Image (tube, rainbow, N blue to C red):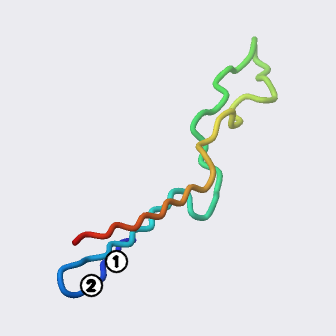
Amino acid sequence: MWKFFRIKPHGKLDVVVEAFNLLNRMNVTQLNAVYGFGAVPLASFGRPIEAASARHIQFSVDFEF
């Protein structure tokens, strides 16, 4: 999200908000691909073993004159 404000006579203020995973839901990046031996799979087969980082929010303010 980005918004700028004019500040008289020559200035400008930029306000920026950036967010990743705002709702803080689990983003799986890797599943357990080891099936096991024979016809019986491991209990952990196909389960998530790695997830992306949690909620990340970044704010910035920039003043130009």
Where residue 21 appears, x then y in whole percent?
A: 55, 57
SS at mark 2? strand
Q: Quadrant of the N terminus?
A: bottom left
Residue at 72 percent across and 28 percent down: it is: 45
Q: Quadrant of the C terminus?
A: bottom left
Question: Mark 1: which amino acid?
Answer: Lys
Residue at 76 percent across and 17 percent down: it is: 39
Where residue 47 appears, x then y in whole percent?
A: 71, 36
Q: Residue furthest bottom?
A: 8
Q: Please give left or right for residue 2 compared with residue 6 in the image.
A: right
Question: Mark 2: which amino acid?
Answer: Ile
Q: Assess whether mark 2 and mark 1 are in contact (beta carbons under 8 angstroms).
A: no
Q: Nearer the viewer, residue 50 or 43?
A: 50
Residue at 42 percent across and 64 percent down: it is: 60
Q: Label 1 belongs to which residue? A: 3
Distance from Cα at disc 1 to Cα at disc 2 = 13 Å
Disc ID at residue 56? none
Where residue 11 appears, x then y in whole percent?
A: 23, 78
